[in-house]
Image (cartoon, helix red, strand yellow):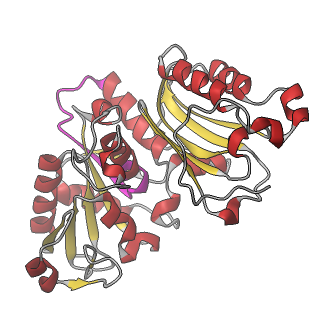
Amino acid sequence: MDNSNPLVVVGVCAPERQSYAAHLARATGGRLISLIERMPPQAQRSISVSPEHPSVARMPSSTVADVANGLDLLHLDLANDPQSSVICVVDALHMSHDLRDGEPLMEIVGEGDDRGDFGSRARRAASYLEVASLICFVNWEPIPTAELSLLMAIASHLNPTARVRLSRGPGEDLRALRASPQDPRPLLERAGWVHSLNDEHDPHMTDSRVATLRYDQPRPFHPGRLTQALDDIDSGRLGTVLRSAGFCRLATRAGVLARWDQVGSAMWIDPLSSELEAATTAQDLAFTGVDLDQHGIRSALDAAAVTDDELTAGPAAWRRFADPLPAWPVDVEELP
């Protein structure tokens, strides 16, 4: 086995992910471990565990890790290692549903745990695709060629750095990965939306129906009109937006830059750290989807931005706008 780095296997379809990880471990002669939501003490004793994140393992290079928890993946020691090999196993029969799945990851969670949010399963499906080095489609054989082309192009748009392939078995997939040049970016910079905001979005696999567009706008959004725009976009009238992400600013909370995070019909707009409050662009967003009406999406979002008269009225007037969006934590301080 090539011992240059561990192999991490991810995917929201548990049976396919677990089977793939087991076969990969046998093919490479590596040790298989499973990172789950909470590691029991005996499992923690069997490997070296990070004291900062007790459910996250420091994995030796000969390990194949079956990762069931997205938080584990993002907190792994190798999260910022450009040589990290993350293999995302995608069940081709369910990919479209997974990216639209409104189910939570867990029905019962503690306060503040977003695994109980509407759409958190879809959010994890997208995040796994976005950090992968290799995206392997399994159960692809019954799917028509045109649909396979569409699915593979979506995956490539969501992560332009990943190698996307129809799996011929873990051993062959790994040889293909090892033969490919490794992208120098760390995991969290592989996402298609990051590439789009950096004007470097160039997916290896394309389909005429799949597109990624960048939207930027210097004016903050009126939250009431933004809600209407989001409803319009979610209706499907402007195509199917599978994923959008980036940064935004709401007129009623103009002192705080926010993270925009959407998958399927699920949407999160959350405040970011004060270090980013000085950013000058109010809206910088990337949208990926199928059969997109790009002009229509831009027009809908432009209509949600503050008008000339509202801009002149200034932040004091903006705070009086109707704001139907979820409230942020009370400890988020806005600039005056």
Quarter of the rendering containing residue 230 = top right
Extreme-right residue of the structure: 312
Q: Is residue 105 magenta?
A: no
- 207 or 286, nearer to the observer: 286
What's the residue at 48%, 34% (across, down)? 206
Q: Position of residue 225 (x, y in %)?
A: 66, 24
* Left or right relative to 141: residue 113: right
What's the residue at 18%, 60% (across, down)? 171
What's the residue at 26%, 22% (across, down)? 144
Q: Position of residue 140 (x, y in %)?
A: 21, 34
Quarter of the rendering containing residue 322 = top right
Report if residue 11 is visible in the image.
yes
- 49 or 31, nearer to the observer: 49
- 83 or 127, nearer to the observer: 127
Q: Is residue 134 magenta?
A: yes
Q: Position of residue 38 (x, y in %)?
A: 19, 67
* Left or right relative to 299: residue 99: left
Please tell me whether residue 94 is drawn above or below residue 246 in the rendered image: above
Please tell me whether residue 128 is drawn above or below residue 289 in the rendered image: below
* Left or right relative to 252: residue 330: left
How many discs mark residues in the rendered view? 0
Which residues are the magenta region?
128-145
Report if residue 82 is visible in the image.
no
Extreme-top residue of the structure: 237
Q: Position of residue 7 (x, y in %)?
A: 27, 68
**In which quadrant of the rendered image does the C terminus lie?**
bottom right
